[in-house]
């Protein structure tokens, strides 16, 4: 099976050491990306680790397709122990980092330890350098990028960085790359913040030495089809379905009080497209579905908002002006926060104060969260930890705030939220796509477990390849088989091992059946969860027997 190439690079920021470990056997079993990082995390992060402690580890990993010039491959994966959910979390981001990472000659970076001083870490194909950067304390993400460009001639495409939110240990702080692309969910920005790592840069020219050969076709065919597609998503990104979802399903509104938003046209796909002023893409991708937007009246520029931000800072807060949502988006990118969790936390606060629709207050509170000022210190803990103090309902699963796609209406998606190791994240299985399209009846949960398992396995493999989720119409199952030189079932098995390792790790931290629940009722959830466990071969309590946990990674000597 095709897999990434290159060693594991372990960087101990406390000891200021860098060690390479050959992991060819692990790569053969886990391909790269999320699967590889999960296997390493499972065996190298202590089960009782503190997410903010030096024993936690953050993994940045690539897959074999980042060696290609194919569309839908400009992404990377991050994995670590989440300060938001207290379990393993993986998240991925696009942009232009992946090729520079590969050029550094490694397949995965592991960051461990804790530095006494704020650090920039520079990874090249000839070694690692540690730079103390006290002058970057409190710097925003763009300010950090500007420093790296001025001092090291390395633009934001070479860099991952945290903003003030990460330094201040906001539990949903993002790791950012290219200034506006976020490793968003789960708070890995706070993990780097706890390690006192402000940024990591990558450069080199080692990629040809890795000798990963990508089959062509289908490489060039996929690239050509992406370039000539007339999909609406190329014009409106993920916001293209906003009005359809609002009118036919549910767009959670005013902190989940309502199911539709009367001002949806002010924040939907057409409103966003009107502000788009140029094309935007990820590395090597001709699909170009990103959304550089500008408001001529105010001069505000940002990238986005995408649909999840339109929901979290728009309808969920009762805000119906796209410029207000653009400003929220820009604040989160600059300060380094996940727009979903941040937006839901702000919406919870607006609910508690009866201030829905107050965009100015939303912007003020967003900034306070990043700096943990006033009420922002409470909200920075996430809704699960602060809802009682606010006097609002706890709209989270396993501590993670909900994405836009409403499990109260899309019951298969609701089931997915309940059992997902990552919590209330829509990308863990994307049951929503089957239910929106009508391929799967949105009503009911029973009989959906087998489909959910396959969707989870597919998503885990996709995040290991690494393939963009928006390329599924082009990077088909048959083409995946050709690209990876393996039967589709073999690819799904990589995903299955990944999901099982995540679950086994979380089980050791105390997660079980009680955590696979929702804050609202949907039909037959208890029975559907039992069906899911049966389909996975897990116990009735939602745990993985030690005998079923796949062998994964070498211990850290």
Image (tube, helix red, strand yellow):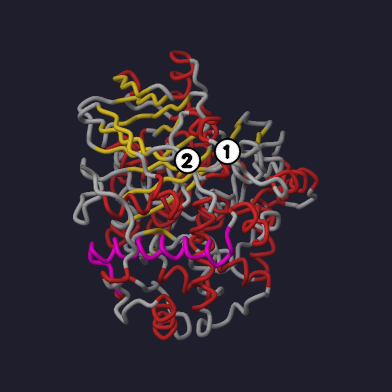
Q: Is residue 230 above or below residue 501?
A: above
Q: Secondary structure at mark 2?
A: loop
* x then y, percent, for residue 252: 54, 64
Left or right of residue 227: residue 458: left
Image disc number at residue 5: 2
* x then y, percent, for residue 18: 29, 29
Say if mark 1 contacts mark 2, CB within 8 Å: yes
The residue under the point 44% across, 18% down is 147
Taking the magenta stretch, the answer to whether it contains residue 488 is yes
Image disc number at residue 67: 1
* x then y, percent, for residue 324: 57, 43
**Image quarter (top left, top right, bottom left or bottom right) of the C terminus:** top left
Q: Is residue 217 above or below residue 123?
A: below
Q: Secondary structure at mark 1?
A: helix
Q: Is residue 244 above or below residue 525?
A: above
**First to last magenta residue range:** 486-512
């Amino acid at each position: 099976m095709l897999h990434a190439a290159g060693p594991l690079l372990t960087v101990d920021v406390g000891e200021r050491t860098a060690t390479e470990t050959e992991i060819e056997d692990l790569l053969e079993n886990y391909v790269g990306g999320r699967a590889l990082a999960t296997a390493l995390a499972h065996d190298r992060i202590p089960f009782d680790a503190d997410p903010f402690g030096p024993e936690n580890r953050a993994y940045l990993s690539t897959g074999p397709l980042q060696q290609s010039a194919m569309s839908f491959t400009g992404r990377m994966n991050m994995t670590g122990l989440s300060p938001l959910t207290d379990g393993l979390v993986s998240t991925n981001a696009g942009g232009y980092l992946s090729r520079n990472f590969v050029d550094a000659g490694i397949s995965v970076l592991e960051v461990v330890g804790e530095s006494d001083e704020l650090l920039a870490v520079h990874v090249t194909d000839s070694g690692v350098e540690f730079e103390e950067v006290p002058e970057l304390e409190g710097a925003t993400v763009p300010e950090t990028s500007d420093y790296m460009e001025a001092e090291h001639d390395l633009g934001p495409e070479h860099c991952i960085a945290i903003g003030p939110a990460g330094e201040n240990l906001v539990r949903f702080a993002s790791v950012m790359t290219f200034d506006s692309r976020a490793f968003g969910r789960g708070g890995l920005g706070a993990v780097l913040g706890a390690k006192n790592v402000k940024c990591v840069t990558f450069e080199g020219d080692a990629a040809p030495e890795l000798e990963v050969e990508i089959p062509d076709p289908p490489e060039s065919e996929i690239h050509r089809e992406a370039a000539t597609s007339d999909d609406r998503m190329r014009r409106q990104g993920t916001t293209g379905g906003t009005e359809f979802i609002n009118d036919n399903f549910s767009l959670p509104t005013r902190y989940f009080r309502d199911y539709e938003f009367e001002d949806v046209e002010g924040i939907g796909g057409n409103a966003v497209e009107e502000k788009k002023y140029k094309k935007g893409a990820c590395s090597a991708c001709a699909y170009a579905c990103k959304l550089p937007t500008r408001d001529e009246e105010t001069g505000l520029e940002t990238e986005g908002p995408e649909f999840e931000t339109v929901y979290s800072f728009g309808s969920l807060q009762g805000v119906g002006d796209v410029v207000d949502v653009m400003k929220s988006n820009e604040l989160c990118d600059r300060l380094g926060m996940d727009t979903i969790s941040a937006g839901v936390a702000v919406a919870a606060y607006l609910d508690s104060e009866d201030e829905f629709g107050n965009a100015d207050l939303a912007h003020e509170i967003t900034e306070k969260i990043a700096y943990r000022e006033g009420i922002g210190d409470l909200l920075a803990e996430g809704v699960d930890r602060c809802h009682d103090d606010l006097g609002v309902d706890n709209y989270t699963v396993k501590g993670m705030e909900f994405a836009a796609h409403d499990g109260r209406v899309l019951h298969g998606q609701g089931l997915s939220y309940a059992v997902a190791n990552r919590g209330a994240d829509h990308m863990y299985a994307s049951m929503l796509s089957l239910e929106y399209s009508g391929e799967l009846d949105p009503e009911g949960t029973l009989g959906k477990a087998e489909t959910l398992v396959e969707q989870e396995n597919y998503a885990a493999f996709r995040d290991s390849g690494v393939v963009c989720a928006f390329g599924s119409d082009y990077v088909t199952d048959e083409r995946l088989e050709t690209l990876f030189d393996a039967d589709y079932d073999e690819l799904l098995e990589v995903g299955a091992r990944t999901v099982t390792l995540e679950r086994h790790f979380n089980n050791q931290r105390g997660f079980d059946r009680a955590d696979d629940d929702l804050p609202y009722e949907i039909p037959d959830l208890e029975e559907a969860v039992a069906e899911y466990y049966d389909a996975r071969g897990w116990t009735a309590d939602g745990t993985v027997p030690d005998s079923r946990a796949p062998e994964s990674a070498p211990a850290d000597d």
